[in-house]
Image: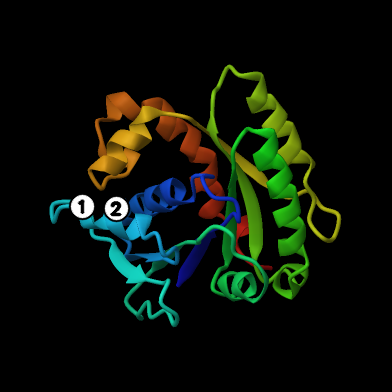
Amino acid sequence: MRSILVLNSKGGSGKTTLATNLAVFYALRRQSVALVDCDPQASSYDWLQERTELRSAIKPVVGWEGRVRIGNDVDVAIIDAPAAVHGKALAELVKRAQTVLMPVLPTALDMRAALRFHKEISDLSRVHNRQVKIATVANRVREISPSRWELEDFLRAMKLPDGRRLPFIACLRNSQNYVRAAARGLGIAEIAPSAVAHDLELWRPLLRWLNGKHSLPD
């Protein structure tokens, strides 16, 4: 089973938006997808309740009540992590994943928080032993804003425990398309193509990386 964890200890970084849209992208490829919501706020779970039977099915899994049961019928599990997760809880979450995606917003506060959180993740034995792959995503950027370039430079400079650069995979813009889609329990890939063409183009590097061997443990 393919397992992808969307993780950042700072709230408001866009984890749920990333997780729900990833679930849609895989479901549209006719894969069996589970969306595991580990956040007690249940944003991903609530989003799933808005989906109609006419849309590609995504299996809801409650992950905030302890032991998680996904089942053997799932091809891809997308895990939406809670904010403020540290210590043993962080280690347990990372154990469930082959790949970790860390969305970061283009503010000084978010970048400083990301640096501290990355240091904590890097201290985990699973990361040291290359049993999980980690990458960053610039999220909710304004494409013509200087803060975009500051964030991209920051993410490109981050390194893994062995000194290699931490992969910076994609830059997703701050778009109302995500808000409109989420309100209907949809991903942006499920609304009018003419309205989301640019956003879908920005997703291509991320989807290409996730579907390649470099996103999987060594």
What residue is rendered at 71% in x and 28% in y? 150
Label 1–label 2 contact, CB within 8 A: yes
What residue is rendered at 13% in x and 52% in y? 54
Residue reaching furthest to the top = 144
Horizontally, residue 70 falls left or right of residue 101, namely left
Q: Amino acid at mark 1?
A: Arg
Name the spot of residue 123 as percent of width and height, x first.
78, 67
Alpha-carbon neighbours of circle 1 within 10 Å: few (<14), some, or many (≥20)? some
Q: Amino acid at mark 2?
A: Trp
Report the number of numbered marks.
2
What residue is rendered at 65% in x and 41% in y? 110
Secondary-structure class at tag 1:
loop
Name the spot of residue 109 as percent of width and height, x first.
68, 39
Rendered-image quadrant of the N terminus: bottom left
Name the spot of residue 66 as percent of width and height, x first.
44, 80
Real-space Cα separation, disc 1 to disc 2, in angstroms: 7 Å
Name the spot of residue 6 as percent of width and height, x first.
52, 56
Viewer-side residue, 170 vs 39: 39
Viewer-side residue, 207 vs 91: 91
Residue 20: which numbered mark, if any?
none
Residue under pointer 2: 47
Residue 51: which numbered mark, if any?
1
What residue is rendered at 34% in x and 36% in y? 179
